[in-house]
Image (cartoon, rainbow, N blue to C red):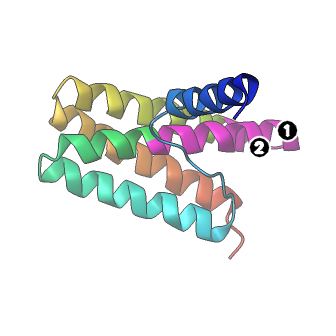
Amino acid sequence: MSTMRKGSALLALLLLAARPVFCVEFDLTADGMRDIDDTTKSLNSNLATKNSKNALGEAQEIAAFFLQVQGYYEAKGNAQDAVDYARKSHELAGQIAKSVAANDLDAAAATVSSLTRICKSCHNAYKTD
């Protein structure tokens, strides 16, 4: 293998290693929303059982998902309420992650309740089925 090819292969490996630990594939379909709902339920369960490691990963996944939802509705236009719901959901998921990282699982659980209320509000306004 040439030195240039070795260098390119090494660079590719380094870039893969440097990517974020979690990666959320964005899916703003009914299935994608059900998946994030399932993740939120799992997060709530992990908080109740004091499983901080899994709870932190799920909170980060939810935050990343709602950041993408926000971008989707910003690009779509004419849906400011949906942008606001997504922004608030992203912020709440970030607060949950911070609370979990600080080992304040009670605060994290309380914030999950706020997050699920925001989800219901958005679904009442935008869900079609």
The percent position of residue 25, horizontal first and vertical second, equals 62, 52
Image position, residue 107 (x, y; %): 22, 32
- Residue 65 left/right relative to 108: right
- Alpha-carbon distance for marks 2 and 1? 5 Å
Q: Position of residue 127 (x, y in %)?
A: 67, 65
The residue shown at (52%, 26%) is 18
Name the residue rendered at 56%, 26% in the picture. 14
Residue under label 1: 75
| Secondary structure of residue under mark 1 | helix
Nearer to me, 40 or 52: 52
Task: Find disc 2 in the rendering and name its residue.
Answer: 72
Say which quarter of the image contains residue 88: top right
Q: For residue 10, which numbered disc appears in the image?
A: none
Name the side, left or right, on which 4 lies relative to 46: right
Q: Is residue 78 magenta?
A: yes
Quadrant of residue 67 within the rendered picture: top right
Callouts 2 and 1 close, C-beta under 8 Å: yes
Residue type marked 2 = Tyr
Q: Spot the residue most to the left.
A: 49
- Near mark 2 (Cα within 10 A), the count class, few <14, some 14-19 or many ≥20, is some
Q: Position of residue 15 (x, y in %)?
A: 60, 28
13 left or right of 114?
A: right
Q: Please rate how many residues cluster around mark 1, counting C-alpha atoms within 10 Å: few if below 14, some from 14 to 19, many from 20.
A: few
* Magenta residues (range): 61-83
Residue drawn where x is 44% and y is 50% of the image: 117
Query: Total number of numbered labels?
Result: 2
* Residue furthest bottom as drawn: 129
Amino acid type at image mark 1:
Ala
Which of the 4 image quarters holds residue 124? Answer: bottom right
Quadrant of the image containing the C terminus: bottom right
